[in-house]
Image: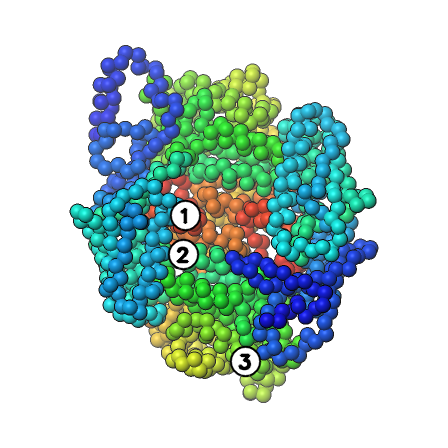
Amino acid sequence: MKSWGEALGRSASAHFSRVGRLRRAMLLLAVAACTGVALLYWRQQTGDQAHRPLHSLYSGVEPQWSWVCRNERCERLLATETTILQSLATCNMLCASTQLWPQPTGPVSLATAAVPVRADAFTLQIRSSPSRDVSDHLSDAFTLFIEDLKSLERTGSSESRRSDIGPSRDVIVRVAVNGSADPRLRLETNESYKLTLRPGDGVLYVDITAYSFCGARHAYETLSQLIWIDPYAGSLLALEAASIEDAPKFKFRGLLLDTARNFFPLNEILRTIDAMAANKLNTFHWHISDSQSFPLKLNSAPQLTQHGAYGPGAIYTTDDVRTVVRRARLRGVRVLIEVDTPAHVGRAWAWGPAAGLGPLAHCIEVEPWSAYCGEPPCGQLNPKNPHVYKILEHVYSEIIQLTGVDDIFHLGGDEVSERCWTQHFNDTDPMDLWLEFTRRAMLSLQRANKGKLPEVTLLWSSRLTRSPYLERLDKKHFAIQVWGASRWPESRAVLDMGFRSIISHVDAWYLDCGFGSWRDSSDGHCGPYRSWQQIYEHRPWIEEMPGMSTGAEPWLIDGGEVCLWTEQSGPGGLDARLWPRSAAVAERLWSDRPEGATADVYLRLDTQRSRLVAKGIEAMPLWPRWCTHNPNACL
Amino acid sequence: MVRQWIALVVFVHLASGNNDISVKDLTPSVYEPSWTYKCVPDEGCQRSQSPEPTANYTGTVYESLDLCRTVCGRFGGIWPRPVTAALSSQTVRIHPNYLRFDLIDAPVETREILAKMTQVATSNLMDECNGNVTDIVETPVIVFITIKTPNLEQTWSTDESYMLDVQNKEVNVAVHIVAETVYGARHALETFTQLVTADKPDYTDQYRCGLRLISGAKIRDKPVYPHRGFLLDTSRNFIPLEDIKRMLDGMAATKMNVFHWHVTDTHSFPLESVRVPQFTRYGAYSAYEIYTTEEVRELINYARVRGIRVVIEIDSPAHAGNGWQWGKEYGFGDLAVCTNEKQWRSFCIQPPCGQLNPANPNMYKVLRDLYKDIAEMLSQPALFHMGGDEVFVECWNSTQDITTYMESKGYERNTEGFIKLWAEFHSTALQIWDEELTAMGQSEQPVMLWSSELTQAHRISKYLNKDRYVIEVWEPVSSPLLSQLLRLGFRTVSVPKDIWYLDHGFWGITKYSNWRRMYSHVLPVEANMLGGEVAMWSEYVDSQALDTRVWPRAAAVAERLWSNPSSSANIAEPRLQRLRSRLAARGIPSDVLSPGWCAQHDSRCL
């Protein structure tokens, strides 16, 4: 068998493992060290490629592509047709686009030269840190960063590691944090950072300055995007020099996962948090309970899980929650646990009578469900039972203690069935009951939070957040998560009224839409599917905000959140639902660039998708691989 | 309701013996919920009202949902639904170590493959317990397999029917399988595994698992349609062999029998051709993203053991580009034209462009070499798909070579002229295929072709012979083409794109069909209606995202084609829930059908 590569004097051949067996493959790289701009791999040419009869090429022929940067885009060429053998990843990194995701908002300058690096040759030096706590977080997050690099390094075949790409550089990462001594993400946390990368003698120096641990951590994330695996070299490469200043446009960048409709094992949640961090999303909104199930096992109210969980094993213990919170904190992510009330509760609250507490909830699993709730099974808390508020106080207190998040809280508060309450309390206006419930839940929250209300308490938009009830909510304490469609008048009214808000418009940022109804053959309540482009291009604060000329106050939008409700999602299909679409939201909220889904956005997101896949996140492809191989050709 | 009252009375009675019960929480503080399930006639499996383990139940309760589903309802947990089934509601504990297959009544020719089929069945049983059946029982289970013909061919007339009887005798369990062919027997083995469930608590941490088999069953079964296909496109994105095998596992679990392998397209050419190595060299995404001849043979065997026939499609004359772009370099002239044309909108419907060059005789030479390779790979009698869809006239029309050729043939440069050229391509291609099969000693075989402009009712009979072509119709359900072709006497396979395309709903204005929509679509029943396929085009899936895009929706189509039930999707849902968990046990993740609560309360979420 005559290998295509073996004809070449200076080529090496190696065994690649592929789908369970070794396969002879070519490696015909002969590298000339490069001066100047680009790191190029040179391949010696042989003459007689053309006009060979078919039969002389029976076997051993392997395809191999090379990419060259022409007119600011990478072009795919057959390796035999070019003198340069360069991988797509390297070409993309060194050609025109920054390849960063989300795109930094400050000045960026990047070298067009790369040097080999090794994951085990990175060292951290903490230059300054406002507290021991921050220092510890910096080193622990750095360890995670190195682990990520190591797993990336492993995706390059070790057998193809080449000696002739030059010696790898050691990398010294010097971090200075001047600011918050609290490593937690707080509402006031400054997440900006500066990152510079420059070559010294035999060493790359990375300097990171930030005002908070979270900012420094984002810098790690950006740094990791300046490092990639070159499959032809079998080595990590890093840009030789870079300078980046960056800060987010919105401070609340969330992702909601509903673990009540269907249960998700802990590893799925941890993986999701890793993926969020890779996109600089900073809030994991954990919709942990609903009428279907209550998997959160709290020490203060274990009955909720006993009666509400799908089964043993479909439970999050307090240790599980701590594991999530710990990982999230090192990833610069806050964990916002929502126990939705007063609606969206179920069998978890059915134990009141047996415990002598009276009914804690009404309409539990009542039939016909369609009369009492939006989807089966029904259930709504009993607003007149004082035990309810005592239990909520315990629940809130334990959540705050577990997550360490006490400046922002989510009460839920959506989709109350007036009919359910009317049936039990026919002497009271159900809207008054709802307001009363909300007031008393806030008292529970205040007591749970050591007598102090969180700076922001979130409520879902609902009938309660429409006039005339909205006026009765206190703007100082409540912020509204607006899930209604962006064009609904009530979605705008909340903003026009001057409430702080988080945008989760159902017509743009609901990831569960478009899969049809799970109860019948109809289209379901919120189709069609939101493509990443639509998600990316959603900028209601620009498109719909009343003009300054009208004299209206600007909207107070703290940020946005992409939502995955899980009627039709379970473990296994999670990643493909979330990614890369959540990455599109992430850039919208971090960078908020005026441009839509332009060619550069496709290109960078495609690269980001491959980063996610390398991290083990099963993100959907953007398009056929040919389009990845031929940047811009599919647009 | 009555039972609850009784329970309450008992509770009050017990409680009255104890004085301070009024405000005490009776819930022990450490236990975790352990639900049980009841099989309620006409409703399905229902979760218990209380999470507490209670002793005083009346009636049968099951500790796991899977166990309940396996015995509940007329067809238990069997998917697709058999023609008739009488199932006992009792189960008997079994262990794979004491499972024996008796092949004495199977013709010698069938035994080798049959043995492999029994191994697959055993391994599927082990999977129910994640490979570790901790509950050891020594009851012998003997499966007697009777097969009537030694014929191993897979064709549209293969008899796939079977009978399956399970009898629990005093000392052992006897399972009798009677089938015409080994493939019928395979389906029986699949059904047999579906009479078994793991007996393990849901979601438990401590591992214990036993197997339970329905202790008595009598099943008669056969498919409605002989062609029950799954199409996978491995050109838009490469799909590794391991993933394809997993898809075949899912097909076998649902008795689908045709793997339609859309292996090439304009985007890439991952199929190795030993005679024309340039195909992969110029067409594969990388050296690692190739199906070697050896791997293809292995896959074809893998499929056969699972009762599946592999149909390779080399789409042509359109949908061919990358892999064909080396002609000039080798002195063959352009084998394909418009390949990777940058202004793609003028030359094709989706980038990259590419269309074979029918004016170039060398193209047919290369095609012949490719066909030879494929004929050698496929098992006999070979079923080949020639593609034939979406010829973009503007591409040919803009190529000088071709317009000159058309002039020489007296084809006008209008629609009919291009149709003639197109038809000429197919007729030449078919002739080559016939010659290559003949050279290998095979008889002429029908080939498959996509519906297109060429297969329009007013045109098709002029160009295509109904005895030679089976038309795969992908027009939307609103199109009359399918019934027109049936009326013209063509054999057809139906893949209505607006219902049975799995990629719809993720791009453009297409709409996602959930499993209910897919299930509810009904095909005409007549001899020339060979069946249908569910199609996974791979623009937006690759190795990632594949399984949940395909499953459980493909299973809905599988039941439509095997059983063609007149009952609704709602009736089928509990069995499909059981199938989901079975697929999961076999390592195939599938999308959930509903919230977990609905899965635990059959028919309460309708």
Given contact means CB atoms under 8 Å apart, are the residues at marks 2 and 3 in contact? no
Residue on which disc 2 sits: B249
Residue on which disc 1 sits: B584
How busy is the neighbourhood of tag 1: few (under 14 within 10 Å), some, or many (20 plus)?
Answer: some
Between B532 and A531, the one lying in front of the other is B532
Above or below, A130 against B388 in this view is above
Above or below, B454 against A635 in this view is below
Sequence-wise, which precedes: disc 2 or disc 1?
2
Say whether residue B479 is left or right of residue A105.
left
Q: Same chain, marks 2 and 1? A: yes
Q: Distance between the residues labelled 2 and 3?
A: 36 Å
Q: How far apart are marks 1 and 3 (CA)?
A: 46 Å
Between A344 and A81, the one lying in front of the other is A81
Q: Distance between the residues labelled 2 and 1?
A: 11 Å
Q: What residue type is labelled 2?
A: Asp
Residue B193 rendering spot, x and y as whole percentages: 31, 52
Say whether residue B328 is left or right of residue A515.
right
Q: Same chain, marks 1 and 3? A: yes
Dot 1: chain letter: B
Which residue is pictured at 55% across the width and 87% down the height? B410
Element on which disc 2 rests: helix
Mark identifier at residue B364: 3
Placement of the C terminus of chain B among the 4 image quadrants: top left
Sequence-wise, which precedes: disc 1 or disc 3?
3
Q: What residue type is labelled 1?
A: Ala
Which image quadrant for residue A284?
top right
Which residue is pictured at 62% across the width and 35% down the height? A331
